[in-house]
Amino acid sequence: MIKTVKVAVIGAGFMGSMHASIFASDPRAELVAVVDRDTTRGQALAESIGKGVRVYASHEELLAAETLDLVSICTPDHLHLEPALAIAAKGVNLFIEKPIASTLEDGRRIVEACKAADVKLGVGYLLRFDPRYYKARELIEAGKIGKPIHLYARRNSARTEGPKRYAGTLPLAMHVTVHDVDMVLWMLKGQVPVTAYAQQTDILLGEMGTQDTIAGVVRFSGGTVVTFESAWSLPAGARHMIDARLELIGTEGSFEVQCGDSGLYFADNQSSQEIDTQHWPEIGGKVGGDLRQQLSSVLDWVNGVECQVATGEEALLSLELTQALVKSAETGEVQRL
Amino acid sequence: MIKTVKVAVIGAGFMGSMHASIFASDPRAELVAVVDRDTTRGQALAESIGKGVRVYASHEELLAAETLDLVSICTPDHLHLEPALAIAAKGVNLFIEKPIASTLEDGRRIVEACKAADVKLGVGYLLRFDPRYYKARELIEAGKIGKPIHLYARRNSARTEGPKRYAGTLPLAMHVTVHDVDMVLWMLKGQVPVTAYAQQTDILLGEMGTQDTIAGVVRFSGGTVVTFESAWSLPAGARHMIDARLELIGTEGSFEVQCGDSGLYFADNQSSQEIDTQHWPEIGGKVGGDLRQQLSSVLDWVNGVECQVATGEEALLSLELTQALVKSAETGEVQRL
Amino acid sequence: MIKTVKVAVIGAGFMGSMHASIFASDPRAELVAVVDRDTTRGQALAESIGKGVRVYASHEELLAAETLDLVSICTPDHLHLEPALAIAAKGVNLFIEKPIASTLEDGRRIVEACKAADVKLGVGYLLRFDPRYYKARELIEAGKIGKPIHLYARRNSARTEGPKRYAGTLPLAMHVTVHDVDMVLWMLKGQVPVTAYAQQTDILLGEMGTQDTIAGVVRFSGGTVVTFESAWSLPAGARHMIDARLELIGTEGSFEVQCGDSGLYFADNQSSQEIDTQHWPEIGGKVGGDLRQQLSSVLDWVNGVECQVATGEEALLSLELTQALVKSAETGEVQRL
Amino acid sequence: MIKTVKVAVIGAGFMGSMHASIFASDPRAELVAVVDRDTTRGQALAESIGKGVRVYASHEELLAAETLDLVSICTPDHLHLEPALAIAAKGVNLFIEKPIASTLEDGRRIVEACKAADVKLGVGYLLRFDPRYYKARELIEAGKIGKPIHLYARRNSARTEGPKRYAGTLPLAMHVTVHDVDMVLWMLKGQVPVTAYAQQTDILLGEMGTQDTIAGVVRFSGGTVVTFESAWSLPAGARHMIDARLELIGTEGSFEVQCGDSGLYFADNQSSQEIDTQHWPEIGGKVGGDLRQQLSSVLDWVNGVECQVATGEEALLSLELTQALVKSAETGEVQRL
C-alpha cells in the first residue's frame, strides 16, 4: 500500500481551492492545512472541505505547527520565492504552480534551495497531464513523427477571462505562452532554442496594462522551427472557450492537438459555448480531469513513482525562452539564446 | 482514510485485463486475484501486474480461497449469471460489465440475488463516467435544456473492430446500442418508453452472423422522441475511430456530445486517425480515462460514497428497451412497451 | 453562342426575389417581368433590378402580354397549380420551387399538363446543385461506396427561422425533410421505398400550429435503410445555422456531407455564428452559390444542355414518400409503399 | 446583353486547361485559341474542348492571327513577362496567374506596359473569389470586426502535391504564402507592412531543392500583427487536403476561415480524405467553384463591371512582402519595409 502523503496548500484562490479539493478527496493524501494571508478566505475554503483541515495566515505558521510531506504553492507568481525557500529548508517536498517564479533569479534560487535540501520540486505544467498532449508526445517518442519539422502552438482565450484576473501583473506570455513553451521544450528534448523573435499588440488591452496577443517564431538547434501564438483578447462570444492547439509536421507523420474540440457544445437562445471536459470538469461534485490526474501523479511521485511532472530545471528553461520572446516583442530585435 | 477494498476480477480478456490493471494501481483497492478458465491467460495477466496477485480457474475456487469486498465480472455476457449468483450468495459486492446479462431472465435473477443478499450491484455503463456525457446530463438537471424534445444517439465504429470480436454472439444492438439506451434512460429519468421501432441491415456482415447497422425511433411517455443509430460497419479508413454522438434539442437549450472530436489526430503517409484520449488512454504506463474514473468511483461507492454507476434495476430497463428494438427490427412491427 | 432565354418570375417574396436577381445578372437570360398579386412588392423588386423589368399582378396578365421561354414559380406551395397549368398550356417551360405542389393530386396535374404541352418542367431541389451533395452522389456513381447500407439525413435549423415563415401551412416534413427525401431518392435510384415509419413532436411549436421535429426510418427495396431527422426548433444561439448532414455507409466506402462546416465562423461579444458560403451568399453585390448555379444550369437546360435538375416525375416521388412519413407520424403506424 | 469577350489562353498545363474549359462554357466568352510551345499538348486541349478552338505555338503567332479582347497567361511564372508585354502592346486586356512574375522588376514592367497601353490587367488571386474569404473580408468592411489586432494565415498541403510540381523553381513562399499575403493586404487596406521576419526549414525537401515550411511574422503600420505559416510537407495521409485558414481577432469581433472544412469527407478501407467542393470542383462535367466565379467576373470586368480581381499594383505589393519574408528566412534578419 502507498503511504498517505500529508499535504498543505498555500493560496486559497482559484487554483489553490481546486488543489485543496482534489487532495482532500484523494486516498493517497491527507490534506492537513490551507494557508492564506486572508484568513477569512482560508477559513471558508477549509470549511467547504471539512475533515478538520486547519487554517494558517502564513507559511511560517504552517511550518511551525505541522509535519508535512508536500506543500503546494498557489500564490501569485512573484510570491513563490519566500515560501518555497522556507519549505525546502524544512525538508518538505514542493509543488509550485507555473511559472516557477516571476524572474529567472527567483526561479534559480528555488531550484538551488530544493537541490541543497534534497527535496522534490515539481512545477504545475498541466498540459503534461492532458491526454491529448501526452499521447501526442508519445507519437514522437514512438518514432511515428520522425524528425520534427515545424510546430504551431496556439493558446487563445476570451478577453473576459485572463485579463480580468491578470492584467497589470506579468505579461501575457508569462501567463499563457509559457504553457506551450514548456510543452514544446519537452517534446523537442535534445534540441535547444537558438533564436527567438516575437511581435505583440496592445490595441485592445493596453489601457488595462497588458497585451492582446503575442506571436513568435523560435528556431531550434536541430533545425526545427516553432511558431507560438497567444491571445487573451478573443471576443466574449468566441466559439472556443480555450482555442488551444499544437500541430506538428514531421518527416514521417504529423499530429494535431485541438483543444477547442472539447466534445461537448451547449446552445441556448443567446449563444453557443464549449464546455470543459478535460482540464478540470467537476464530476460527481469533485474536481476531475487533468488537474486531478496531475496531483494524483504528484502524490505517487512523492512516494517514489516516476512521473512526467515538470522539474525545476525544466521550469527554468521555459521561463528563459518565454522571457526571450517577451524581450524580442518589446525591442523588435531577434534574441539569440 | 478510506478502507482498502479487496477485489477480484473474473475474465482475463480485453476488459478484464484493464480492470485488473486499474485496480492494481489504485490506492483504494487491493487486487487479490484474477480468475479465468484459461489459467495460462489468467497467469499471464497476474504476472504482468505482479504484487502477488493470485490466479484461479473458477469463481468457485476464488470464493473458497479468498475474503473479498468486490468482484468484477468481465466474462462473456451469457456467462454472467452463475458467478454473479455465487458471489452475491457469499455476501460480496458485484460489478458486472454491460449488459447485465444476455437475457432479461438472467438479469432479473442477478438483481434479485443481490437484493436478497443485500450486496451492492453496479453495471459497467462507461458513458456515465465520460465527462462529455456526464456534463451533458448535468445541463438537463440544471434546467438549461428545459423539456427534452428530441435526442439523436449514434454509435458507429469500424468493421475491423466489433464484428471480429462479437459476430455470432448477441446482436449488434445488445453490444453497442445498449450503451446509448442506458444513457438516454438516465437522461430522461421520469419518462418511460412507450413505443419502439427499428430497422436493421445485414448486407455486409450477414455472412459473419451479425448486423451492419440498426436504426430505431422510440417515443417516450412525456412526448420526447429518440433516434438511435448504431453501426459497426464503417470502412477501416473512417476518419472517426468511434463516431459516437448524442444530440439533444430541448425547449430552452440544446447540446451536442461529439465523441469523434477526440482532440488528437495523427496522420502518416498512409492515412489519418483519431487517437482515444477519453475512454481508456494509457498515460504513464497506466490505463487512465473514463474507465479508471468509473472503477475508482465504484471503489469509493463500495465504501459508502454515492456514485452514478448504473444499478441492476437500471440495467434491466436498458436491456428491455434494447430487446424491443431488436424485436422490432426482426419483425418490422412497432413494439409497444 | 447560347440563345438568350426570356424569363419571368412569379412571386416576389424571399425566393422569387433571389431568382429575379440571379436571372437579371446572367448573360444566358433576359428577365422580362416579375409577377406578384401585391403589385407594390412586385414594383419594388423590379425597380431594385432596373433594366426595364415589367410588373404584372397575375400570371394571366403576364401571359397575355409577354412572349416567354421560361417561367419560374415561387409562390406559396398551394398556389403552384393554377399558374403552372396556364403557363404549360401556353407552351412555356416551367421551373417550380419545391415541393412541386401541396398535394400529390396537384402535382400530378402539373406533370401531366407539361407532358401534354411538351414543355420542360424542373423542380427546385437545390441540394442537387450543392457541390457537397453533388460530389457525394458522384462517389456512389463512381463505385467508390459499393452497395449503400445506411444513410442518415439530417436537416435542423433554428426556431427563429422556418416556423416564423411557414407555421400553419404545410407540415415541417413538407418544407424541410422533402429536400433530403429528393436527394436520397436520387442517390438510391434503382431502389424504391417499401416501408416508412416516423414519430414527430409538437412540444415547443405545437401552439404555432407546427411540429418541432420529425424522425423517420425508411426501408428500401434493395435492403438499404435510411434515417431522416428534421427539426426547425434549434435554440436561436445554436452553433450551426443549418445543421444539415448526409452520411452514408456502404460496402466499399462511406461519406459524410456536413453542411454545418460552412468554413466561415464569426464571433462578437455576444455569440458566434456560421456564415453561409454555399447556398446563396451575396458576392460582389450579386446572389451567388448553389442557387445561382442551379438557375444557370436551368437556363442552359432550356437551351438543350443536360442537367441534374429534378424532373416533375421525380418531384412526385419525393412528395409521395414525404407524405408517407407524415402519415406515419400522425398515426403511429408503419406505412407500406 | 453583355458583349461576348474573345479570349485566348497561353499555357495548356494544369491551370491553363481549366481556364480554357471554363471560358469555353461561359456564355460571356468566345474562346478563340490556346497557345503552348508544345503544340501536341495545345492540340489535345483544343480537341477536348471542340468548338473550333485554334492552336498556336507562341504568343507571336496568336497575336498575328487573332483579334482578341482578353488573354489569360498561365505559363510558368518566369515566362509571364514576354507575352504580357506583347499582348499589352497590342491593346489587349490581360489576366495573369499569380504571382504576377518571378521578380519585382518583371512585375513592374508588366504593370507599366499595361498602363501605357491603357489595357486592363488582372492577377489570379483566387481567394478573392472564395466565398469564405470574401465574406470574411466583408465582415471587416461592415465594421463587425472593429480594428484588426492579429491575423493568422496558414496554407499547408501534402508533400505529394506542390513539391512534385514546383520544387526547383521559385521558393515555397512565392507559390503558396503569396496567396495569403495578397488576401491579408486586401483585408488590411489602409495599413502597410513595416517589418517582416521569417524562418524556414528544408529538412524533408531540401534535397528536392525546396523548403518544407516557412513561418513569418509581419507588423503593419496600424499596429496589426500577422502570422503567416505555409508548408507543402504534410504527410500524404493528412486529414486536410488543403489545411488553409485565416483567423482574425479584432476589437469588436473575430472570424475564422477554415478551408479544411470542405463539408465532404470520404473514407474507404485504406484512408479518409476531404473532397474539394469550393476551389474547382467538377460539376456536371464542367469546372465550377471559385475559379469559374473568378473568370466569369473577369469577363464581366472586361465589359466594364467592377470586380474584386487583384490589380497589377496590388500584385506588386504582395510580391514585395513575400520577397521580404523569403529574404528574412534566408538571412535570419528582420526586414524593414
Image: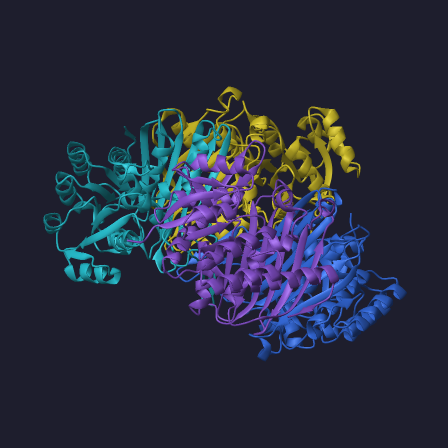
Chain colours: A blue, B yellow, C cyan, D purple
Instruction: Locate residue B63 relative to residue B119 in the image: left or right.
Output: right
Judge by depth and name the residue closer to the eye, D45 or B57. Answer: D45
Whole-percent x and y of residue A327?
A: 73, 72
Where residue A62 sits, quadrant-wise, is: bottom right
View extreme (right): residue: A116
Whole-percent x and y of residue B35?
A: 70, 30
Q: Is residue D43 visible?
A: yes
View extreme (bottom): residue: A207
Judge by depth and name the residue closer to the eye, D128 or B305. Answer: D128
Q: Is residue B196 visible?
A: no
> How many discs appear?
0
In this rendering, is residue B226 above or below B109?
below
Instruction: Locate residue C199 relative to residue D19 in the image: left or right.
Output: left
In this rendering, is residue D114 above or below C139?
below
Quadrant for the C terminus of chain D, please: bottom right
Whole-percent x and y of residue B151?
A: 41, 45
Where residue B253 sits, quadrant-wise, is: bottom left
Residue at 73 percent across and 74 percent down: it is A78
Where residue D225 sits, quadrant-wise, is: bottom right
Judge by depth and name the residue closer to the eye, C253 or B161. Answer: C253
Whole-percent x and y of residue B152?
A: 43, 43
View extreme (top): residue: B207
